[in-house]
Image (spheres, rainbow, N blue to C red):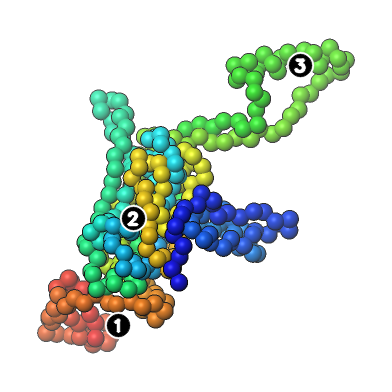
Amino acid sequence: MALDITGFTKNIIECQSTLSGDCCPIDPKLSVKPWAYKINTHGGSDNCEFIVKRRPEKGWSLDFVFNREDLPWSDGGPFYFLGVREEETQPLYADNNLSFRFTNDGRIEWRAYRYSGECVTEAYQETFYISSGQTPTLCQDGTTDDFNITIVFDRHLRHTDCEIENAGGWNDLITGSTITNATDVPYRFVPCMIMGLSYYLALKYARAVTLSGATENYQYIEELNKDWNDERYARLGILKIYLNGRPIYKIDNWEEVIPSKRGLQPFIQLWGGGASGSGGIHTGKNSFNLKRIKYVEEPLNALQVRHHYLVSTKPYYTITECVKPCEETISPYNDKSLLIGGVSSDIMETENNDIIIF
């Protein structure tokens, strides 16, 4: 059954703490698109794991099943967004946004508003720019019915424990902190206020007075800066896109987007539509029937993507494969056998330098 896509919602699906202390179950999806999930929110019936982590150890995989319902590609639009929405201040949304969409001519396009900087005549100068890329046109016959899109980001480096936040992570954005439970008195008057209070307390009590109060709560300030730009290498990896279990797009040295506490909060993961803000590059509505979504906090390799398609996707949906002749021919690698593990094996090499062992 097609989803109701007549409107949008600004509600954010998130968990509420229970009296028992257990984390709450995941709320059911809303009846209209897009669906927004708050990142770093706890979930589950008996544990407190994040539903969506701010930054996985190695990367992530997105998996979708669409049906165009005979609609033109121009009705596709954005189908995934990550970051802060409705934010219009450039330093707050840069490196804090990412979207994937269908183009009018049947491609998949990714967009992100980026930040960079360089030292010019001993001064650090900042730059903001739009980064984007497109797949080839999706094959017509492979998208006439249901079709499966898988998007994978595989970071070059695996980060664990403290590396997740420190190696090119959000700690590189921290430039200071502020006390969230301080008095409304201007900061420059606080010493005077404390000395005055001490004086009057000393007049009231003959004995020595010890001042006490609530523990100060700090909120760290995240801002784009040179340290963040210098650690960019720790955020680079490979972005791959698959159609019906087969690779159609690959770009190396692609920079991951790590949601930041800059800008209007909360930062979210949004499915089935676009978002406002970020210079208007993510706006739009997706009118296709979005039959299934999956998010895995691991980068699936090509064999895993293909296996998932053949076992968990194709048998349950009406999918027509792309009709395209095999362009890759197989020729002998050599006329001898190769000893592998002490066993003689014949091997072949394809034109793409893939090795096949018989």
* Separation (CA) of disc 3 from disc 2: 64 Å
First in residue order: circle 3 vs circle 1: 3
Image position, residue 297 (x, y; %): 45, 61
Sequence order check, earlier mark of 2 and 1: 2
Q: Residue 136's quadrant in the figure?
A: bottom left
The residue where tag 1 is placed is 341
Q: Earlier in the sequence, mark 3 or mark 2?
A: 2
Q: Is residue 79 visible?
A: no
Q: The residue tagged with tag 3: helix, strand or loop? A: helix
Residue that mark 2 sits on? 77
Q: Amino acid at mark 2?
A: Gly
The residue drawn where x is 27% and y is 87% is: 343
Percent from the top left, x then y, of residue 315?
A: 39, 81
Q: Which residue is found at the position 68% from the left and 59% from the top?
A: 22
Amino acid type shown at disc 1: Gly
**Given the image, on which type of amino acid does mark 3 rest?**
Ser
Q: Is residue 56 above or below residue 228?
A: below
Contact between marks 2 and 1 (CB within 8 A): the answer is no
According to the picture, the residue beneath numbered tag 3 turns out to be 198
Quadrant of res 122: top left
Mark 1, Cα crowd under 10 Å, few <14 / some 14-19 / many 20+, is few
